[in-house]
Amino acid sequence: MNIQVDVAKQARNTQTNFDVLIVGAGISGIGAAWHLTKQSPGTSFVVLEVQDSFGGTWLTHKYPGIRSDSDLHTFGYSFKPWTSAPIASAAEIKKYMGEVIEENDLARHIRYGHKILKAGWSSQDNLWTIDAVRTDTNEQLRFTANFLWMCNGYYRHSEGYTPEWKDMAKFKGTIVHPQTWPEDLDYKNKKVIVIGSGATAATLVPAIAADVAHVTMLQRSPTFFIPGRNAIPIAEQLRELEVDEEWIHEIVRRQILHNQAVFTKRAFEEPETVKNELLAGVRANLPEDYDIATHFTPSYRPWRQRIAFVPNADLFKGISSGKASVVTDEIDRFTETGILLKSGKTLEADIIVTATGFNLCTLGDIDFTIDGKPLAFGDTVTYQGMMFTGVPNMVWIFGYFRASWTLRVDLVADFVIRLLKRMKEKGASKVTVELRPEDKDMKILPWIDEENFNPGYMMRGMHLLPKRGEKVEWQHTQDYWGEKDRIPAIDLDDAAFHYEGKATKAKASAA
Ligand SMILES: Cc1cc2nc3c(=O)[nH]c(=O)nc-3n(C[C@H](O)[C@H](O)[C@H](O)COP(=O)(O)OP(=O)(O)OC[C@H]3O[C@@H](n4cnc5c(N)ncnc54)[C@H](O)[C@@H]3O)c2cc1C
């Protein structure tokens, strides 16, 4: 996709009042734009994106080896077949998204280099006023929209999370975070430590192993991994039979989702068996005497954190080759030449990579107000992880962690289209969710159940996230298999939904 073309188009487009304003041009925002175009033609909308192109996560992250950790049949959209190997590089994902934009003429709706700073709701006008700044000219811009569709993801793109360790400043080498990887970083023949054990570390370590003098993955505690061939047998068979790609996409999606449902259920019902199976997969790919118990046996039950798929077992090949190793220990302090561990051992390094996660970011770091009053999202309760009590005309796409994020993009998008249609039918220009009388005694809890899923960035930022209620409709359950039936069946006339607006008011006064 040629960005020059996009910039030229956006320069000509000066419209500032829209029915819907979408925040972000990642996989969610582009999906939202597709759904609006196809399912609600005639709805005027704009996508505002702070970066210079589309892609979101897949544009921001540029570290060596950057790739998906879930399959692209389900991380891709339901409406556009994925035709390559299931685990894909950032470049392949961007190409796929570029095709969605091009094939559906979405570029004319997107304005890049637009950072949204403020969003204020006016109950007098039933409109959001959105203040943005152009990153190239610093020009202040004001937009209005009846409906705000938040597709901003869940973490701050400008900077990753790096803990403060003792004496970090004393280290004479280079410290980098994968999220802000310098494209000219020379790691050839260097000693590298990657701090972390998640998907990022597991991608980065094999990607640089061949070039570095040595790379050490330094982890405080181990993670579950699933090594496997980067291929889906049923897709290969169907391709051999020259079945249409649309069919293959649908069949493979169904198979993957079925297998994941079985796996997730088993992870809860027979965690020890699942754990042993996962460990056997790792053991099969490492030398016989390798210390799996220390380095690859997590203390939590499977699925409490995302399980990273390791395509073609590349991480384990790196370890087996001797170019990569794993150390499980805690950092005592940095030294001039590396890291001193709590065990007393030292690790020497020229480069230290802090693959230590993200800064959770609720709703795009935008200052929200409702009728002039600052809005604290931590004080609201979520409706199905999409809407928030007291916040009119707004939906956030917060995807799945256990299943592919994008499965929820399609589900939430269908919900938004239905909601916009219902508003139109009622002649309403405002819709809010509120707890119903029967919800008044419901227990109000943090956004996510720590027992269910507990990655570090969620735990650190939980107080910033909206609350959930005990009842399923007041939660983001992270359960695709429940939501795939529940979200399409939401009764938009349920007492949780409050519609207002000119036509409704007129009706009320006539009555
Ligand atoms: C390295 C990495 C690998 C991952 N791999 C997978 C995977 O394999 N499978 C999976 O399901 N999930 C994966 N995830 C989670 C991933 O973030 C989501 O799946 C998905 O890409 C999020 O898409 P999104 O469009 O909702 O948000 P993002 O990709 O975060 O995009 C949000 C966009 O909104 C823009 N934005 C935010 N605030 C503003 C503002 N104020 N003004 C203007 N623009 C704004 C951002 O610039 C960004 O472009 C991964 C995450 C990371 C970091």
Image (tube, rainbow, N blue to C red):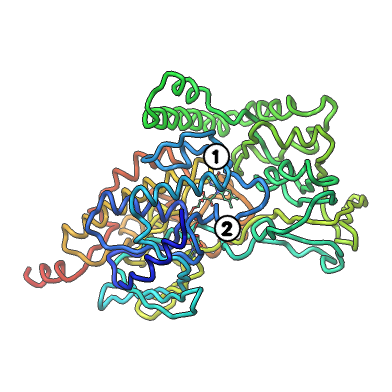
Quadrant housing residue 395: bottom left
Instruction: Label 2: state its secondary structure.
Output: helix
The circle drawn on residue 60 is 2
> In front: 149, or 370?
149
Q: Is residue 232 left or right of residue 201?
A: left
Q: Are marks 1 and 2 in contact (CB under 8 Å)?
A: no
Q: Is residue 115 left or right of residue 147?
A: right
> Percent from the top left, x then y, of residue 489?
29, 43
Image quadrant for the C terminus? bottom left
* Amino acid at circle 1: Ser
Query: Does residue 9 appear in this view?
Result: yes
> Percent from the top left, x then y, of residue 284?
73, 24
Distance Cα–Cα, label 1 vs label 2? 18 Å
Q: Tell me the mark number nearer the camera, choosing from 1 and 2.
A: 2
Q: Residue at x 45, y 46 (%)?
A: 406
Q: Residue at x 56, y 37 (%)?
A: 87
- Residue behind label 1 places its C-beta within 8 angstroms of ligand 1: yes
The circle drawn on residue 70 is 1
